[in-house]
């Protein structure tokens, strides 16, 4: 069933691309086709450097048409590129807020608020503003059709807060929701994180089982966008199970694959795992080198200046929104 689902998805993507290439009028239908194509394919090819220009064109056409839905979704997609592909959360936050500002003014676009708010919540999560992120994601539980992502994100937060049993609970709930849609990508991603949290909680066999199942899905369905994160998690799980060679294999491969993505957080985690691997193997020179790189990079991933800048942007956004509302009321 999973293989048939993926085959069906590929057919839909190919069909959309053909329709777009042969569509001659830049109208709202054209914009909708482009946003559907982006939603289905962009995360499958994150190293494709043409995605930014593609979304900028969609935004430009939407602006010319004064098409709110097109503008909001284009801003959100541009934010995703900056956030995940370019590791630039501050620039991403600007685009997410642009998208949300449009959505707030148009009640018909309410359903799109979930995706944008999720992305804003993820920036808070990545910057370790866990209470703020958790509040946002628990609000999103009111949207049952998006519970897979919401449960997954809540599981992530509890994991980082070391509330491991709560994290495991929400991951398992996320898998139940993902299986309803046969969402292979989601299932692989959730199982990868679940395996790591179970391992950290001391459930080594359960953690190893979910990790292996995740890796099998990644390889079987060629989920390239998942490889780096799955490999990083697998390295930690194998290390905890004293499978040192496997831990080194996955951590090393994660670093190599990450070169194209330039994701600092992922590189930071892989380096930390490699430092432990080399220490276990008695290669203290390599362990020290990897650890030093990890420490330097960790300071770049999270620092006080970036947290302060994000808070300032959020405050400014709320002030601008309130001012705009006041002007309308006048």
Image: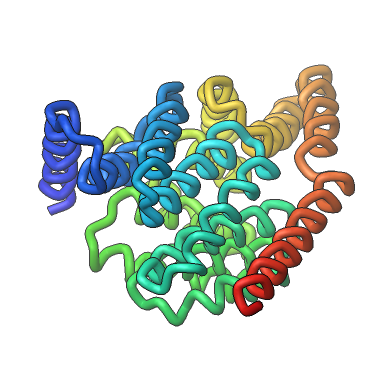
Image coordinates of residue 88 in percent, x first then y, are 66, 37
- Decide if residue 135 is in sight here: yes
Front one among 235 and 328: 328
Q: Residue furthest toward the top?
A: 285
Front one among 288 and 20: 20
Which quadrant would residue 273 be assigned to in this image?
A: top right
Left or right: where does residue 43 sit relative to residue 6?
right
User: Which residue: 88% across, 48% down?
Assistant: 304
Give the tally of numbered discs: 0
Q: Residue furthest toward the front?
A: 330
Left or right: where does residue 327 sit relative to residue 257?
right
Which quadrant would residue 261 be assigned to in this image?
A: top right
Q: How is the image coloured?
A: rainbow
Q: Residue furthest toward the bottom?
A: 142
User: Which residue: 54% across, 78% down?
Assistant: 139
Image coordinates of residue 148 in percent, x first then y, are 39, 66
Front one among 280 and 175: 175
- Decide if residue 161 is in sight here: no
User: Which residue: 58% across, 21% down?
Assistant: 259
Q: Is residue 148 above or below residue 254?
A: below
User: Which residue: 12% across, 28% down?
Assistant: 22
In the rendered view of the protein, which quadrant contains the C terminus? Answer: bottom right
Image coordinates of residue 19 in percent, x first then y, are 13, 34
Left or right: where does residue 187 sit relative to residue 232?
left
């Amino acid at each position: 069933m999973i293989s048939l689902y993926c085959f069906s998805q590929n057919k839909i993507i190919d069909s959309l691309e053909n329709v777009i290439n042969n569509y001659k009028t830049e109208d709202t239908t054209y914009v909708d086709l482009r946003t559907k194509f982006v939603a289905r394919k962009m995360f499958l090819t994150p190293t494709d450097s043409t995605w930014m220009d593609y979304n900028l064109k969609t935004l430009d056409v939407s602006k010319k048409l004064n098409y709110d839905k097109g503008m909001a979704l284009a801003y959100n997609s541009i934010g995703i590129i900056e956030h995940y592909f370019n590791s630039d959360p501050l620039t991403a936050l600007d685009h997410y807020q642009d998208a949300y500002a449009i959505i707030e003014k148009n009640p018909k676009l309410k359903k799109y608020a979930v995706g944008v708010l999720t992305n804003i919540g993820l920036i808070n999560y990545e910057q370790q503003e866990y209470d703020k992120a958790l509040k946002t994601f628990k609000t999103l539980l009111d949207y049952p059709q998006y519970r897979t992502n919401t449960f997954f994100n809540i599981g992530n937060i509890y994991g980082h807060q070391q509330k491991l049993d709560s994290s495991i609970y929400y991951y398992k709930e996320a898998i139940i929701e993902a299986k309803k849609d046969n969402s292979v990508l989601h299932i692989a991603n959730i199982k990868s994180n679940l395996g790591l949290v179970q391992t950290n909680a001391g459930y080594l066999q359960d953690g190893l089982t979910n990790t292996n199942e995740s890796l099998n899905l990644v390889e079987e369905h060629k989920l390239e966008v998942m490889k780096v994160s799955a490999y990083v998690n697998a390295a930690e799980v194998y290390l905890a199970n004293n499978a040192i060679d496997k831990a080194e294999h996955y951590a090393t491969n994660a670093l190599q694959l990450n070169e194209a993505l330039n994701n600092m957080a992922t590189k930071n985690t892989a380096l930390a795992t490699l430092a432990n691997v080399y220490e276990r193997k008695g290669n203290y020179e390599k362990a020290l080198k990897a650890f030093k790189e990890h420490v330097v990079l960790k300071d770049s991933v999270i620092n006080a200046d970036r947290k302060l800048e994000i808070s300032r942007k959020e405050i400014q956004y709320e002030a601008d929104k309130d001012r705009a509302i006041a002007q309308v009321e006048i």
